[in-house]
Amino acid sequence: MILSARTIFAADVDLRYWAWQRDEPLTEQELAELTVQKVETIYWQVGELQNSGETWRWKARFRFPSSGNGRIHFVPAVRIVSRERQPFSEASVAALVQALSSAITKHEELQLDYDAPDRLLGNYAAALEKIRALFPHLTITALPHWSRSDCLKVLEPHVEELLPMLYDFEAEPVLKNQSPMPLIAAEKISKLIADWKACHKPWRAGLPVFARLSVYDANQKLRGQIRNWTWDELCFNRNVAVESGGQFGATILRAARSTSISNTPIQQNEKVIVRLTDRAALRDAVRAAETAGAQSVVFFRLPDSSASSGWSLPQLGHLEEGPRLILRATSNNTLELVNEGNGDLPPHFASEKSDGGGYELELEAGSRIFREAQPGDFASVSGYAAQKSAGWPFATTVRFKFSELRARARLETGLIQLAPGADFRQSRYRILNIEGGPSWKSLE
């Protein structure tokens, strides 16, 4: 029997989130959705400590929320980064403890995020014991393979909980004759989760819900990741097109000509890999964690407005639901496209056979009523007459382009000027490129 996502989250599994690199407090809309999902705990990154020699310095700091509407418990989380061969000498550990104690006060609980190499696990465990004197409820993130008995034997006595991060556990492959590695590999995730049954301390399954953009060179070797980007840059870039895609949320875009994305140069024949967590694989991973005895599922990361944060917060609470788009006229001679569903309308990429990516909101009237239109929140707007491009004011059809639309989000056009005596009710609309094909509808 397949349970719905809402049943899993609301009844069977304690759902939590990591809030990463965020200064802004939760909005009222976020708090409302977290209440629906019965989320009671969020791990909130307060900073990143990096050491040089035996000194630890804050590379980044983030504002810790004062409250969560009285219901959400926030746990401070600190990322630790070290390039030293021996980062846990006696003096270094003392400096680390001092840095944590001076920055994180009035908290008995702390989470540390450190990708310790196996050779340092013993030293890391000794450092954890010193930190535990300050924070009695100490939790750590864990690499997937720390489920081995030799790793657990070292770490378990020094922490209260472990949170295995069940992704990014293998090096990126060369693409030749291989598919890109998805964020959740359905055939591997269940085994990774099952291996954690051996853990004697409480453990929580960390699962990815973000999006990632990777660039591969012409030899199909990884060049690196693009950090700041938008869906518009990908969907409306006429120099890249889908080569293959869709398997477990991974899509390969190939550059037909040199271009750039977020100021990152992309050369001809290089490939851009777009990865979104596959929702079906995520649902199955949640179910596997429940079966394996995980205390909870923790999603990385709490979604925000950036494209890299992946699925929206409502979508993560309703994994099997889709979008529901409605177009309404406003009192300001504009139109508003609203996604009233709990599911996101995902980005739509250009293919070799199409004239461009994204979606198009198309308005059609029986006569030339459209005098002028501004794009507003949309990527662009064009006017047509008899399906041919027409300069204003002779358009019978208007098309607004957009790349995606998350659950509960909305896009508003700019000012639309109509012919004297004309009304939006004289037109109908449809969404082009949407799954299932477009169908004409009347405005609300």
Image: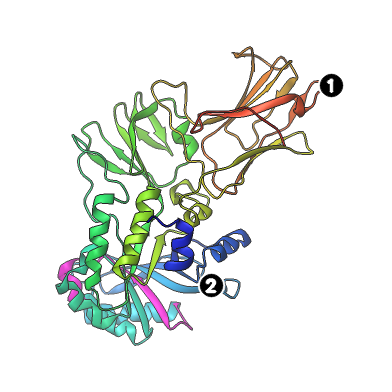
Q: Is residue 277 visible?
A: no
Q: Residues within 10 Å of mark 1 (few under 14, many from 20)?
A: few
Asked whether 345 falls inside the magenta stretch, the response is no
Q: What amino acid is labelled 1 in the image?
A: Pro
Where residue 224 appears, x then y in whole percent? 30, 44
Vertical comparison of 150 with 371: above or below: below
The one nearer the camera, 361 or 134, is 361
Question: On the picture, is 204 further left or further right than 231?
Answer: left
Between the C-alphas of marks 1 and 2, the distance is 54 Å
The one nearer the camera, 31 or 62, is 31
Question: On the picture, is 124 further left or further right than 375?
Answer: left
Point out the tag, 1 or 2, that comes first from the N-terminus.
2
Q: Which residues are magenta?
A: 104-123
Vertical comparison of 370 with 374: above or below: above
**Residue labelled with disc 1:** 420
In which image quadrant can residue 234 be found? Answer: top left
Asked whether 117 falls inside the magenta stretch, the response is yes
Q: Residue at x 34, y 24 (%)?
A: 256
Q: Residue at x 44, y 25 (%)?
A: 238
**Number of numbered callouts drawn:** 2
**Residue labelled with disc 2:** 72
The kind of secondary structure element at disc 2 is: loop
